[in-house]
Amino acid sequence: MDREEEARLKFGQRIQRCYGCFVAFYMKNMWLAEGGLFYCNNCKDDSMFHFEDFSRKLDLSKLQPD
């Protein structure tokens, strides 16, 4: 596994609260809405895109290594 994919997997392990139901989920299971708000699968709508699509467009080299 290359460094970029490893960073993407680690980033997806972060916890984020859904702005619709306020339940916490791993970011890898969430959907991004306009304005940078994350929603769970139950609260999403057709205008949002999945974290996987979002994370592929990130410059992961900017994330701080732990």
Image: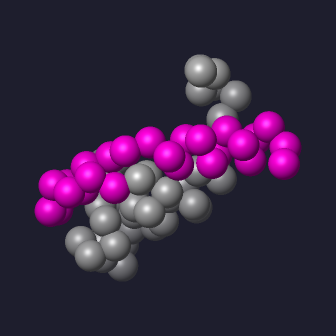
Is residue 64 part of the magenta span, yes or no?
Answer: no
Q: Residue furthest left?
A: 21
Q: How many marks?
A: 0
Q: Nearer the viewer, residue 43 or 12?
A: 12
Is residue 3 part of the magenta span, yes or no?
Answer: yes
Instruction: Write the start and end of the magenta stretch as one range.
Output: 1-25
Please give the name of the residue rendered at 72% of the width and 43% of the height, measured from the top-left corner. 6
Q: Residue furthest right?
A: 2
| Left or right: 58 in relation to 5 | left
| Left or right: 4 in relation to 36 | right
Please give the name of the residue rendered at 74% of the width and 47% of the height, measured from the top-left corner. 5
Quarter of the image for the C terminus: give it. Answer: top right
* Residue 50 pos. (x, y %): 48, 65
Residue 11 vertical position relative to residue 24 in the rendered view, above or below: above
Residue 36 at least partly seen: yes
The answer to which image quadrant residue 44 occupies is: bottom left
Please give the name of the residue rendered at 84% of the width and 48% of the height, measured from the top-left corner. 1
Q: Nearer the viewer, residue 16 or 50?
A: 16
* Residue 43 pos. (x, y %): 24, 71
Q: Nearer the viewer, residue 46 or 60?
A: 60
The answer to which image quadrant residue 4 occupies is: top right
| Left or right: 1 in relation to 47 | right
* Residue 30 pos. (x, y %): 40, 61
Residue 58 at least partly seen: no
Please give the name of the residue rendered at 31% of the width and 65% of the height, measured from the top-left corner. 40
* Residue 20 pos. (x, y %): 17, 62
The colour scheme is: one colour
